[in-house]
Image (cartoon, rainbow, N blue to C red):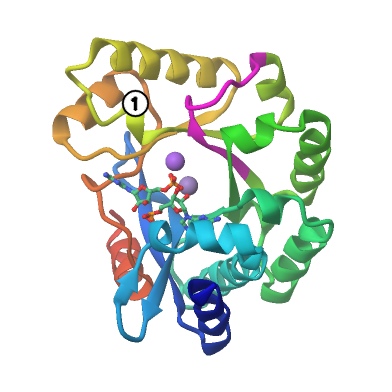
Amino acid sequence: LQVEAQLRQALEAGEFVLHYQPQVDMKSGRIVGVEALLRWQHPQRGLLGPLQFIDVAEDSGLIVGIGRWVLEEACAQLARWRDEGLPPVRVGVNLSALQFRQPDLVDNIADVLERYGLDAEWLDLEVTESLVMEDLPQTTALLEAMHALGVSLSIDDFGTGYSSLAYLKRLKAGTLKIDRSFVKDLPHDADDAAITRTVISMAASLNMRVVAEGVETRAQWALLAAEGCDTVQGYFCSKPVPAGDCARLLRSGS
Ligand code: G
Ligand code: G
Ligand code: MN
Ligand code: NA
């Protein structure tokens, strides 16, 4: 309960910040997107990552308010970068299960985009594979409503759940994000190499983009490039960084 009260107060006090992790196009080497990742600038404990508070935020329902703040701040940042004349990038925002079930989610997204005058396609909503595969009829309808708004959709943590390939096509998500667990033991692990190769070719045949997560080494980059992966995200390119550092990366192009 103590953490819950602190989280509530943190939201009011403006202690949350977003860091941004670049997503790099493998062919051009350019940054084509960034994922917004939540941090808590705790007055005593310093900068905390989501693992240290996201479960409490989910269980208490505070994730709804926090998630709303994340969406607002990511869009505000996108508008600031646009106003500074930076080349446009897609900004990925993670949606939690509870947030996804809020009846006003789509209206909220439409409202934020309108207020900042943003083209919907630059907002990339990340939903996990397990979330979309739960309660499929409702999920499909919701994703269709988002698709109609024109926002981009990514399936996060792909490979860790049980996606029906037939549904995957119907979800109208533009991007599959290959979970880091399949990347971390590349290039040595033959099973993981086979899995990533299969997901990449499946994504291509469904006309989806694919982002490999957690790329840390040149050898992983090389293998994924050879397998035809479009985009990578990971420490090899950049850690998640504050908005100011991210702007510098965007300005320099890669
Ligand atoms: O960078 P990292 O330690 O930041 O993130 C850890 C986990 O927290 C990831 O699974 C990520 O999806 C999740 N996460 C990061 N930011 C957000 C957010 O804004 N909302 C939600 N729901 N999850 C987030
Ligand atoms: O949303 P998602 O579950 O994909 O969250 C991404 C998480 O992965 C964040 O915690 C982010 O900080 C972390 N991350 C990003 N790149 C790397 C990487 O190259 N290696 C490792 N170990 N973690 C990473
Ligand atoms: Mn994510
Ligand atoms: Na992921």
What is the secondary structure assignment of the residue under circle 1? Answer: helix
- Counting from the top left corner in percent of width and height, residue 223 is at 23, 22
- Counting from the top left corner in percent of width and height, residue 254 is at 28, 53
**Badge 1: residue crowd in 10 Å (few <14, some 14–19, many ≥20):** many
Q: How many marks?
A: 1
Range shown magenta? 153-165
- Counting from the top left corner in percent of width and height, residue 124 is at 58, 50
**In the image as oriented, which residue stretches furthest toward the front?**
1
Residue at disc 1, CB closer than 8 Å to ligand 4 = no
Q: Nearer the viewer, residue 118 or 73?
A: 73
Q: Residue at x 25, y 10 (%)?
A: 190
Amino acid type at mark 1: Phe
Relative placement, left or right, of 248 versus 108 is left
Name above or below for residue 185 compared with residue 147: above
Residue 200 visible? The answer is yes
Residue 88 visible? The answer is no
Q: Quadrant of residue 208?
A: top right
Q: Nearer the viewer, residue 37 or 91?
A: 37
Q: Quadrant of residue 75?
A: bottom right
- Counting from the top left corner in percent of width and height, residue 86 is at 43, 68
Query: Is-magenta flag for residue 155?
Result: yes
Name above or below for residue 108 compared with residue 195: below
Q: Residue at x 31, y 84 (%)?
A: 44
Q: Which residue is mark 1?
A: 182
Q: Quadrant of the N terminus?
A: bottom right
Query: Is-magenta flag for residue 41?
Result: no
Name above or below for residue 31 compared with residue 183: below
Name above or below for residue 195 compared with residue 243: above
Relative placement, left or right, of 171 versus 74 is right
